[in-house]
Image (cartoon, grey):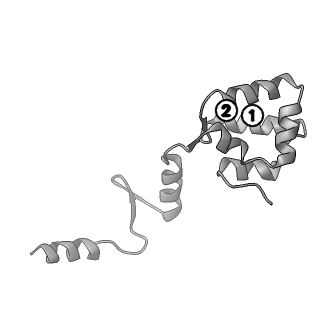
Amino acid sequence: MINYWISAIDNSIYEGDCRVGDIAATSAQVVAWQTANAPPVIITFRQFMALFTAAEQAAIVSSTDTKTRLFLLSASSGSVNLSDPLVMTDLTYLVSIGLLLVARVSQILTNTAPPA
């Protein structure tokens, strides 16, 4: 009886039959929902700084720019939530003043190690 129930559940799911809650959805909508509802990515300051190359680290740490110093101070005060929009804003600012390349922002936000 249990096996019949399980196979009945397995047979009720067909290719393209995606649902978000009680609403029929496309695969793209499901992926968007999963992304929007993904748990935050929280890392330590050391792990965060390891996402930058040695040159980027040196440029950030030696910068005399007030916003950059505040970014560094804020990040070092505890854990860093890579899902926080303020982190994206800070990284975009680092790009605007030439301390970081645009392509590196997405790598950092996805918790990807810097190129060797």
Residue 101 is at least partly visible in this image = no
Q: Quadrant of residue 20?
A: bottom left
Relative to 66, 2 lies left or right: left
Q: Position of residue 60 (x, y in %)?
A: 84, 35
Q: In this rendering, is residue 104 above or below 69?
A: below
Which part of the image, by quadrant, shows the N terminus?
bottom left
Identity of the residue drawn at 69% across and 26% down: 74
Residue at mark 2: 86
Which quarter of the rendering shows the C terminus? bottom right
Q: Are marks 1 and 2 in contact (CB under 8 Å)?
A: yes
Whether residue 44 can be seen here:
yes
Choose between 46 and 25: the one closer to the eye: 46
Query: In the rendering, at what x and y percent does residue 94 appear?
Result: 82, 37
Q: Please, what secondary structure does the residue beneath circle 1 have?
A: helix
Q: How many marks?
A: 2
**Pointer 1 residue:** 90
